[in-house]
Amino acid sequence: MDWQRYTLMGGIAAVVLALIFQWTEFKQVNTPAVDRTTVVRADAPTLPPEEKNAGSDVPQLKNGQTTATANNGGERKLISVTTDVFEVSIDPRGGDIVKVALREYDDKLHSHTPLILLNQTREHTYIAQSGLIGHNGTDSAKGRPLFSTASSKYAMEEGKDTLTVDLKLQQSGADIVKRYTFKRGDYLVNVSYQVNNTAAQPWTAALYGQLKRDSYEPATDVGIGVHPFLGAAIRTPDENYFKQKFDEIAEKPTDITIQGGWVAMVQHYFLSAWIPPQNTNNNIVLRQLSSGLYRMGFTTPQVTIAPGQQGELNASFYAGPKDVYRLEQISPYLDLTVDYGWLWFIAKPLFRILHFIQSNIVSNWGWAIILLTVFIKALLYPLSSAGMRSMARMRKFAPQMKKLQDQYKDNRQKLAEETMKLYRREKINPMGGCLPILLQMPVFIALYWMLTETVELRHAPWMLWIHDLSARDPYFILPVFMGCSMWFMQRLNPQPADPTQARIMQLMPVMMTFFFLWFPAGLVLYWIANNLITITQTWYINKKVEASGKA
C-alpha cells in the first residue's frame, strides 16, 4: 500500500506548508508599522493641518461647471454628537464626519473604551465626506463651505427616537441646511441637503458622498488562516459584490454608473458605506488621490430647483458592525460585504442556523456552536457512518491482515493481491475512513470563514475562562483538550501496518494541537465537539461490528 502511505505523507506535508505560509503572512500583516493611537478629541479647537487643503479632493462632474467659492481660512470647533450607539464628530468645514466611535463595541475586551471606526489624526485618515457640486454646488476645488450650527454639542434625549443635527449655510441665492438624522439603536444615518432657492434663476447641483482613507490596517486576532479582507467594495452592473484592495485601486481605478448601488469600506467585523438614492443612475468611483489617500465615493445626477421653490437631495451613511440582517434591509446585496469566501453557500446557511440556535434556544454563542456541531454531525451521519463501518471492519480483521503481512513480507506484490482479496471477501473499503474527513473539511473551512466574519462572536463569552470566542484560548486549554480527543479518536481506528505511516499518524494530534493554539476559541470548540461526537459514533459502530460481524 505504498500509494496510500505516499498520499498521506504528501497531504500532511501540503497542510503543514500551507499553515506555515499562512502564519508568516498573518504575522507580516498584523505587525503595525507605526503607532496610530492618537485620536481627535471632540472638543479639539482645530483639525490637523493636513486637512487645510481637503477641497482639492472634491469630485468634479463630468462636463460640469461650478460657480462655487469658499473660504478655507479660520479655525473651527468640531461638532460633537452622542447617541445610544454613536459618538460622532462633525467638521463644520464641509460638514464632514471625521470621527465615529461605536459605543456598543469595546476597542479591546473589557476595555470599556468605544471602538473608533472613523477618525482623523496626524497619522491616520478615515473620514466620510459629502457635499454639493455642479453649477450651484457648495463644494469645489477652490474650497469647502463653512457651516454654522445652533450648538457645538448634541445628544439624544431619553425617550426620543431620533436626533437631528442641522448645519446651515447662506449661499448667494439659496438657503441650505445640511441635516444629519440619527435614529436610536441604528447605525444608519440619513444625510440630506434642504435647499430653498430664493434666486430668480434655477438652482442646479449634484450630491456626492465619499469615504477618504489611508491604507492603514487595524490589528486583528484571527489566528492562522485566511486574513479578513480590507479594502473597498461596490455593486456593479455585472457583479453584485466587487471588491478591491488598496493596491488594486491604485493600479486600476474603478469608474462605473449604476442605478442605485452603494460604496463601502470593508474591514474585519465592521464597515462604513454610502448608499445613494436607489432610483437614480449614480456614478461610483474608486481611485487613489494625489495625496496618497484613497477615495471611494458616489455622485448623483444633477437636480434642478425652480426659482422660489424648495428641494431636497439625500443619501444614507452606514458606519457600524457587519450585521447581515440589517445590511440586507438597507440596500440589495450590501450584506455580501460579510464575505464568507468561496464556500459561502455552506457558510451562509451555517450562520443562519447558528443565529437561530443562539436567539431561540441557548442565548450563548458557545453553546450554540456545540448544538450546531450536533446538527451537522446528525445531518452527515448517513454518509459518514459507511466510512466508520468500513474502518470498524478493518479493525476487526486487523489480526488477519497482520498475518498476511508476516506471511508475504518478502513479496509485496503477493501481499497486495491477498490483502485486496480479504477486502473484497469481507466487504472492506480501505478508503472508507477518508470519507468522514472529506465530508467535514469543507464544513470546517466554511465554519472558519463564518466564525471569522461573524461580528456577534467578537468578545462573546462562552464560560469560565473563555471570554472571547473570536480570539484564541488565552491559556491554550481548549487546543490541548482537542489534541487529546484526537489522540483518543485514533485509538478507536485501526493503526496503519506500515511503521513510518503509523508514526506519522501518531504525530498528527501533536501537530494539530500546535496549529490550533492560534485558532479562534469558537472554532476549536467546534472541533472538540466534533471529535467527541465522532468518538461516540465510532465506539458505537465498533461494538456493533464486533458483536455481529455485520453493519
Image (spheres, grey):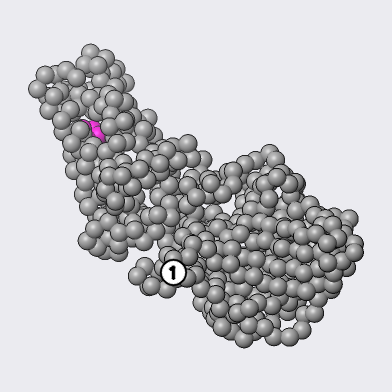
Residue 345, x across and y down, in percent: 47, 36
Q: Nearer the viewer, residue 318 or 347?
A: 318
Magenta segment main secondary structure: loop
Residue 26 in view of the camera: no
Residue 134, x across and y down, in percent: 83, 61
Residue 361, x across and y down, in percent: 27, 44
Q: Which residue in the structure is indicated by mark 1? A: 158
Total labels drawn: 1
Q: Residue at x 49, y 62 (%)?
A: 161
Seen from this angle, which residue lies furthest left? 547
Where's the C terminus, which quadrant? top left
Q: Is residue 400 left or right of residue 480?
A: left
Height in image: 114 above or below 211?
below
Seen from this angle, which residue lies furthest top? 425
Q: Residue at x 68, y 50 (%)?
A: 277
Where's the N terminus, which quadrant? top left
Q: Secondary structure at mark 1?
A: loop
Q: Nearer the viewer, residue 308 or 343?
A: 308
Q: Read off the magenta span.
A: 494-499
Residue 124: image quadrant is bottom right
Q: Residue at x 21, y 49 (%)?
A: 484
Amino acid type assigned to the residue bearing label 1 in the image: Glu
Height in image: 518 above or below 168?
above
Q: Nearer the viewer, residue 3 or 550?
A: 550
Q: Is residue 141 left or right of residue 509?
A: right
